[in-house]
């Protein structure tokens, strides 16, 4: 039942005797490899954690993806391995250096040094009607970022979001933060599923939503 | 950090096609021939009110002959644009200062740690050895000067390893000092007011903690005051501790050299002026004397409070730097009463 949620191109394969998620592509961050397959570490990747937990992300393989908060490319490199054209937006120069290195051998991964809070600065590059937006930004106002970027998403597209409670307010109770973010999100999106990611990432909530 | 929210949620969708400033795709205005530099330039500096189906538009307008070619060209353009933008942002002078101060701290920490190891080891082999970096340096120097007898006496492999390790410690300590000299030379050029007010090293540390001169310039004085005391601050916000009075600015003479009862006020006054200095440095970049006079005046007022009790306790350094996170309970309780 769980593996039905996995996109094409993501498989469970045995690494040192344990079944782990894996995609096909050049290694990026020293992960274990098996031939051309490389393990996807759910503790380092929120999307990996969601797939490992059996969330229906709407990712099927081959789709167009906009990834907000790509950081050093750990997760987005796996996404580009199984998806189609993948736009990776990251704001900080230091991790973006590694993102460029991960993008180099991946012909359909497009790195962009841009601020996800200002979509107009990359709307001339990222195409409209993308199938999936994956968002993992460590900033206050995560719902606002998602709402502003809804302009890129197809009507039947999916937003896959990891809410980082600590980025909104370090002192507040994570549950309160989730409720606030979800309420703001509901102005633009219809939330389909929420899953706590605590097994792999403390104080993170995984959300799948679709535009209203 | 660009906090200005000039983009609103209600960007209207572009009604007209391709042409015109700000509404076209990154490829508009570029000929069909591959032009890597022009492509990268447009990717990095361009903008559009709303996204459109750029791959199809590019094909329709004859810029590229197929979607595959479009994506190939986009890949070349985005990787080139991002690579050069990263290089440019990282090469900025304040970022170099950040790297230098972090490298200096790493060298110092490593040298101290290795010096302890050398002391522990050397003590078992050389009766005259002494602890710390000075001890390691003495051991390394000694081995170098009496090279003549080295051959006979130091043929023991273990002795040679200990001396070699001691030499590394001395070299690391030298590197640390060289980095400090570099910081002292470059900081005034990057942030003249901040460096003059805080000293080169503290100025560099503040910039490093904020992530850059621009981010520091955008921080309120209250944040500058507790930069480097994050543990204590979050403990306070969670209701477990008194508020920290100072972060790394504790190392400044104005704070450390003020009697404990007045350190909160001193830290607040200093942080206020440091925040202003960072703003002048980032937005104007020229030295402003009045800023420094104001601070000296204010510090004199604060320190005058102690006159009734005689001298201030001076910067004798006996407190060490462990006070930086401001967890000293008694200070926290008394500070409210001193606020003017």
Image (cartoon, rainbow, N blue to C red):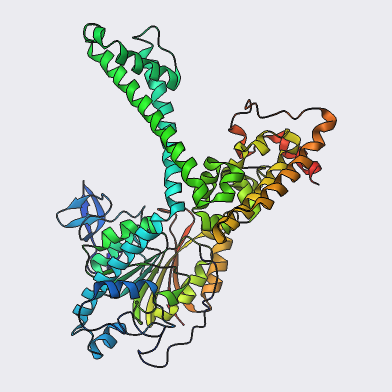
Residue B310 image position (x, y, % from top left): 81, 27
Residue A50 image position (x, y, % from top left): 37, 62
Can residue B332 be seen here? The reply is yes
Q: Is residue B198 above or below residue B283?
A: above
The extreme bottom residue here reads: B16
- Residue visible at 23% across and 62% down in the picture: A104
Instruction: Tell which of B19 and A185 is nearer to you.
Output: B19
Q: Is residue B324 above or below residue B162?
A: below
Q: Is residue A192 above or below residue B174?
A: below
Residue B217 image position (x, y, % from top left): 57, 57
Can residue A5 be seen here? The reply is no
The extreme right residue here reads: B308
Instruction: Tell which of B190 and B232 is nearer to you.
Output: B190
Residue A137 image position (x, y, % from top left): 45, 63
Residue B74 location, quadrant:
bottom left
- Residue visible at 76% across and 36% down in the picture: B261
- Residue visible at 24% across and 70% down in the picture: B76
């Amino acid at each position: 039942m769980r593996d039905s949620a996995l996109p094409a191109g993501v498989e469970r394969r045995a690494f040192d005797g344990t079944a782990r998620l894996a995609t096909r592509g050049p290694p990026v961050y020293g992960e274990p490899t098996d031939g051309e397959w490389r393990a996807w570490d759910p503790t380092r990747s929120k999307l990996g954690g969601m797939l490992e937990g059996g969330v229906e992300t709407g990712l099927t393989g081959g789709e167009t993806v906009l990834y907000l908060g790509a950081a050093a490319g750990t997760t987005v490199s796996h996404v580009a391995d199984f998806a189609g054209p993948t736009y990776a937006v990251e704001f900080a120069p230091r991790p973006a250096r590694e993102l460029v290195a991960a993008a180099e051998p991946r012909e359909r991964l497009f790195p962009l040094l841009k601020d996800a809070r200002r979509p107009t600065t990359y709307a001339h590059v990222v195409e409209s009607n993308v199938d999936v937006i994956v968002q993992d930004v460590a900033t206050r106002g995560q719902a606002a970022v998602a709402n502003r970027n809804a302009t890129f998403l197809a009507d039947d597209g999916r937003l896959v979001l990891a809410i980082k409670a600590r980025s909104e307010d370090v002192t507040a109770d994570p549950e309160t933060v989730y409720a606030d973010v979800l309420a703001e999100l509901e102005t633009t999106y219809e939330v389909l599923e929420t899953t706590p990611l605590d097994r792999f990432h403390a104080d993170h909530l995984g959300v799948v939503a679709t535009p209203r | 950090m660009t906090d200005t929210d000039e983009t609103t949620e209600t960007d209207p969708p572009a009604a007209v096609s391709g042409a015109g400033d700000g509404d076209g795709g990154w490829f508009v205005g570029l000929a069909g021939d591959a032009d890597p530099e022009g492509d990268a330039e447009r990717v990095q500096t361009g903008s559009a009110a709303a996204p459109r189906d750029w791959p199809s538009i590019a094909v329709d307008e004859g810029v590229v002959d197929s979607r595959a070619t479009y994506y190939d060209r986009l890949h070349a353009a985005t990787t080139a644009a991002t690579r050069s933008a990263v290089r440019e942002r990282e090469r900025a002078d304040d970022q170099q200062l950040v790297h230098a101060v972090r490298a200096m701290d790493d060298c110092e920490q490593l040298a101290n740690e290795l010096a302890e190891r050398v002391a522990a080891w050397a003590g078992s082999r050389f009766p005259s050895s002494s602890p710390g970096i000075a001890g390691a340096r003495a051991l390394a120097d000694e081995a170098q000067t009496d090279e003549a007898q080295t051959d006979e006496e130091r043929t023991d492999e273990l002795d040679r390893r200990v001396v070699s390790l001691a030499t590394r410690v001395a070299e690391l300590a030298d590197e640390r000092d060289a980095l400090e000299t570099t910081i002292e030379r470059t900081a005034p050029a990057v942030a003249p007011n901040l460096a003059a007010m805080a000293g080169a090293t503290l100025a560099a540390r503040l910039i490093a903690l904020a992530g850059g001169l621009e981010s520091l310039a955008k921080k309120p004085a209250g944040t500058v005051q507790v930069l480097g005391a994050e543990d204590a601050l979050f403990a306070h916000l969670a209701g477990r501790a008194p508020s920290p009075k100072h972060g790394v600015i504790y190392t400044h003479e104005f704070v450390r050299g003020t009697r404990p009862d007045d350190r909160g006020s001193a830290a607040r006054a200093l942080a206020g002026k440091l925040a202003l200095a960072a703003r002048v440095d980032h937005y104007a970049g020229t030295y402003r004397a009045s800023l420094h006079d104001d601070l000296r005046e204010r510090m004199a007022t604060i320190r005058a409070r102690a006159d009734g009790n005689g001298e201030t306790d001076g910067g004798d350094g006996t407190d060490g730097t462990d006070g930086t996170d401001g967890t000293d309970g008694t200070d926290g309780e008394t500070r409210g009463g001193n606020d003017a």
